[in-house]
Amino acid sequence: MRGHAYLVGAYCPGRSVVHRAPLWLKGLLLLAVAVACFAFPQVYLTSAVLAAVVVLHFAARLPAGRLWQPVRVMLIFLVLIAGYQYLQSGPGTAWQVVAAIMATVLASNIVTASTPIATLLDSLERAVEPLRRFGADPERFSLTVSLMLRSIPFVIGAFDDVRDAARARGLERNVRARTLPVLIGTVAYARATGEALAARGLGDPLD
Amino acid sequence: MSHVLLQEASFSAETSGGSVRIILQPTTLELSEQRIAVIGANGSGKSTLLRLLNGLLLPSTGSVSVDGLDTRADGGAVRRQVGFVFTDPLSQLVMPTPLEDLELSLRRRVKSTTARRQEAARLLQEYGLEPLGGNSIYELSGGERQLLALATVLAVEPTLLVLDEPSTLLDLRNTRLLRSRLAGLNQQLILSTHDLELALDCSRALVMDAGQVVFDGAAADAVAHYRGMYS
Ligand SMILES: Nc1ncnc2c1ncn2[C@@H]1O[C@H](COP(=O)(O)OP(=O)(O)O)[C@@H](O)[C@H]1O
Ligand SMILES: [Mg+2]
């Protein structure tokens, strides 16, 4: 199930204000978005934050399609969560929770789209460097993060594959037929990535 | 030159039925020639043998070591020394673009960001891939991908390179290109292949059948033996 041309989470070159902003500032704003959305779960605040994130997306001159892509990946989960919250606590909470997730995901999407992977890795490594004497391995940490980013397009592709396969067998309404293969595929992908790193002697702790 | 030693190394796997199947019979081998080929039918155990060499698989019994480093006890050190090239280059590439993938390989060896980028660009050029550095790896042709996969493994400067059927997915032109690339390398090579010409480029060849090494000798003799098995 490997082989998807999607480049979500990939860098979109550009010269916008967002591209030129230092990475620490982008990281701080991302953190602020997450804290505002999840520590202060209020409908108006979360809606305003989501609107601000969308404005930033266009300020970074990122294609409109990249707003929709990450949402589409999570669509099944968003609908399930919204449905559950709607029944438990009503429409306000349902919207707040979904908007909070979307705002945070879109904000991290802006960070990865406006920062080359190499810069991201180097900065992460530097940020974790002081923790080395407590046993942290900055190189492995940054590698792990970059591979998480790299897995996003794969998971999106897997959802598409599985949807097509389910459709071909008339199972498109079967949630299990649509999610289980994605899980299995994702585990296989993680395994393959581990092997790909082992093949280059990367990913083992340096002793 | 690396010195690879298999001592009574075997590999078995549990089948879904619950019984244990021996995929590689206990094998004792010393591999230190510059070019070694492994040939044999599909399912004869070539990939299993090769995967044992850098610890992608650990032996079920016996041991495998490279220059005295045991793949079980010193897996990390063995892997830094032994690079592995898969049949399918997409299994090898983990970053979105060729340039980023090469930079990933260089992270440990080249610490400065600018030097790393320069070195990655130089490697792309060496492999004739520089116009494609920023493209998606999915936009490369099969031949370009296999060359890139080779480049990313070589970028970590292994002393021994293991290649599992590196030309099986390539057309004739790209197979030739890969053969001449491999011929020009200083590294020690151990490769499995169905391409008997590629096998004949080696000085020593092993023939495998049903999980066993059934012939071990000069490449020309091994190829003759292999042909004889099916005539
Ligand atoms: N982990 C495993 N579990 C069960 N069977 C396996 C496993 N790995 C390999 N095999 C089987 O062992 C045999 C040898 O496999 P392999 O080493 O890939 O052969 P080759 O590379 O020569 O085609 C094949 O029949 C394969 O299906
Ligand atoms: Mg094989």
Image (tube, coloured by chain):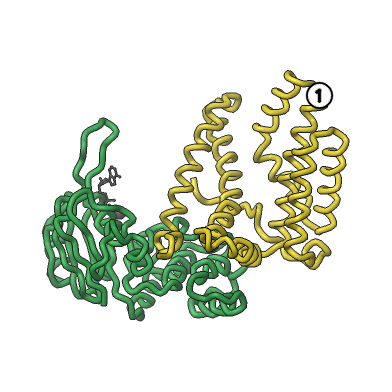
Chain colours: A yellow, B green
Residue A116 placement, left or right of A47: left
Depth order, front residue of B107/A1: B107
Q: Quadrant of residue B193?
A: bottom left
Mark 1 surroundings within 10 Å by alpha-carbon count, few (fewer than 14), some (14 through 19), many (20 or more): few
Which residue is at a point 82% across and 38% down the rendered structure image? A46
Image quarter in which the N terminus of chain B is found: bottom left
Kind of residue sitting beneath label 1: Pro
Mark 1 lies on a secondary structure that is: helix
Depth order, front residue of A109/A169: A109
- Residue B86 is situated, as x and y percent measured from the top left of the image, at 38, 59
In this rendering, is residue B19 above or below A192?
A: above
Q: Quadrant of residue A100?
A: top right
Which residue extends farthest front? A134
Which residue is at a point 57% across and 69% down the rendered structure image? B99
- Residue A180 is situated, as x and y percent measured from the top left of the image, at 51, 32
In this rendering, is residue A192 above or below A11?
A: above
Number of callouts: 1
Which residue is at a point 57% across and 51% down the rendered structure image? A148
- Residue B215 is situated, as x and y percent measured from the top left of the image, at 12, 62
Q: Pointer 1 indicates a residue of which chain?
A: A
Q: Quadrant of residue B20?
A: top left
Residue B220 visible, this orientation? yes
Image quarter in which the C terminus of chain B is found: bottom left
The residue that label 1 is drawn on is A91
In this rendering, is residue B22 above or below B146?
A: above
Which residue is at a point 71% across and 51% down the rendered structure image? A108
Residue B135 visible, this orientation? no
